Amino acid sequence: MGKKFSYQSDDYDRQTQRFVIPLYIKDNLGNYQYSSTGTFVKYNEHHYIIFAAHALEKDISINDIFTFTIDGTLHKIQEHSIGYKVFKEADIVIVDHFNNAFDGKNYFNLNINSLIGFDKKHFAWTGFPISRTKAKTIHKTKTKETLEKEHIHSDGNAIYFKNTKYFTILSRLINQNKNSIFGKYNRKNTNLKYQGDVNMAPHPKGMSGGAMYLFTKERKLKETLDDTFRFLGIGLEYKNNKTIIGISRNKIIELIDIFNRESPVELIFQEQNSLKT
């Protein structure tokens, strides 16, 4: 008898992990290797996935980046998109899905600026660490039905990925400027929400591209997600001195504006505006 599936997450954290998605790279053999994290944002009615540009190192192209969906298939991240832009110096990739929103996912609204009611001294960083990802490789020989059975769990009310677990780091906001966010993450002898006291917390490798966000002082769900979470940026780096670094919301908006000026949308008809993940 197989081990019973247990999903350690409360209602609050279920919402936080819906802002992010694990990303896979298709290698030369046709297999899929776990890579990093993507974040969902919306801005001026466009829906975007943004992730760290260093995921495209070693001649990896945007065509090699895939997302794993709830029906056991993998799809290119730019499928159904209207364009993308790689900003190497800023270490960010922007993929524009226009009016195509991923079904069941949450999008940070970049058009909202107010910080009233939010804790401005701390932030969270949510992503998918490699150390918590059992499915580091998805082999090309496996069928859709096999992948769905191995990776997906449904309890009748919700659908969960069994082999890719999200993780959230809480940090004091050490510094912030128009381009970057700085915090601290001490892995040693710490307390985790669901595991309790641990000698060593997960390494953030794989969380690059994951969402950094402010939360309310009570850290409870409000009437709307916009009242509960406020986008701060995406995480990019974890240094040996325990510093975590991200690219700021303002810089991301600046880059989206540059992208849209260079590749304006004239007229696009979409019959289907919901993507399954």
Image (cartoon, rainbow, N blue to C red):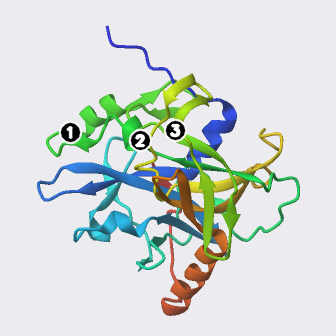
Pointer 2 local density, CA inside 10 Å: few below 14, some 14–19, many at least 20: some
Q: Residue 194, position in %: x, y?
A: 59, 25
Label 1 or label 3, whichever lies nearer to me, is 3
Q: What is the quadrant of residue 174 in the picture?
A: bottom right
Q: Residue furthest right?
A: 116
State how far apart marks 2 and 3 are (Cα).
Answer: 32 Å
Q: Is residue 92 above or below residue 36?
A: below
Q: Nearer the viewer, residue 24 or 209?
A: 209
Callout 1 amino acid: Thr
Q: Position of residue 41 (x, y in %)?
A: 60, 63
Pointer 2 residue: 70
Q: Along the polypeptide, which appears first: circle 1 or circle 3?
A: 1
Residue 177 higher or lower than 266, as above or below = above
The label number, if any, that marks residue 187 in the structure image: 3
Of the residues shown, which amino acid type is indicated by label 2?
A: Ile
Q: Quadrant of residue 164?
A: top left
**Which secondary structure lies at badge 1?**
loop
Q: Amino acid at mark 3?
A: Arg
Secondary structure at numbered mark 3:
loop
Q: Is residue 273 left or right of residue 250?
A: left
Tag 1 near tag 2, CB within 8 Å: no
Q: Is residue 164 left or right of residue 99?
A: left
Furthest residue in direction left, as rendered: 29
Residue, x 53% and y 50% (percent of image)?
242
Q: Secondary structure at mark 2?
A: loop
Real-space CA distance between mark 1 and mark 3, rounded to the nearest whole angstrom? 38 Å
Give the residue drawn at x 59%, y 44%: 169
Query: Can the viewer see residue 274 in this picture?
Result: no
Give the labeled residue for mark 1.
Answer: 143
